[in-house]
Amino acid sequence: MADKKEIFADGIGQIHFAGGMVRFDFVTLQPQEDGQAPTTEAKYRIIMPPQGFLAAFDSMQQLINKLVEAGVLKKNENAK
């Protein structure tokens, strides 16, 4: 795993479906002069087939469930 690279993102700016693939645009926050609120800047794009997207979503949902069980996250009962 010595060749493994880490990429940091503050969040996902967009997720869209184009050309038969799911595309995630990851963003970072960029500071502004004069104390203004930071802006987001698209930095990286991950493209995967729908099956890969579903597998990733399932993995994320399992992690969310574990974090809720551990008390790290709280379930939003008002969510629709």
Image (cartoon, grey):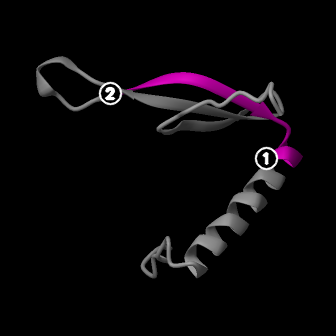
Depth check: give the residue in front, 54 or 74: 74
Q: Residue furthest left?
A: 34
Checking the image for residue 71, the label placed there is: none
Q: Residue furthest front?
A: 2
Disc 1/disc 2 C-alpha distance (Å): 27 Å
Going 71% across and 27% down the picture, which residue do you hit?
5
Going 52% across and 34% down the picture, which residue do you hit?
9
Label 1: which secondary element: helix
Checking the image for residue 53, the label placed there is: 1
Main secondary structure type of the part rendered in magenta: strand
Quarter of the figure that contains the N terminus = top right
Label 2: which secondary element: strand
Going 17% across and 17% down the picture, which residue do you hit?
33
Query: Label 2 neighbourhood size at 10 Å, few (<14), some (14-19), many (20+)?
Result: few
In this rendering, position of residue 65 left or right of residue 79: right
What's the amino acid at mark 1?
Phe
Image coords of residue 40 (percent x, y): 39, 28
Against 25, is 53 above or below?
Answer: below
Query: Splitting the image into 4 quarters, where does residue 61 fall?
Result: bottom right
Among the two numbered marks 1 and 2 on one chain, the one whose residue lies closer to the N terminus: 2
Going 22% across and 32% down the picture, which residue do you hit?
37
* Magenta-drawn segment: 39-53
Depth check: give the residue in front, 63 or 78: 63
In this rendering, position of residue 2 left or right of residue 46: right
Against 61, is 26 above or below?
Answer: above
**What residue sits right under mark 2 in the picture?**
39
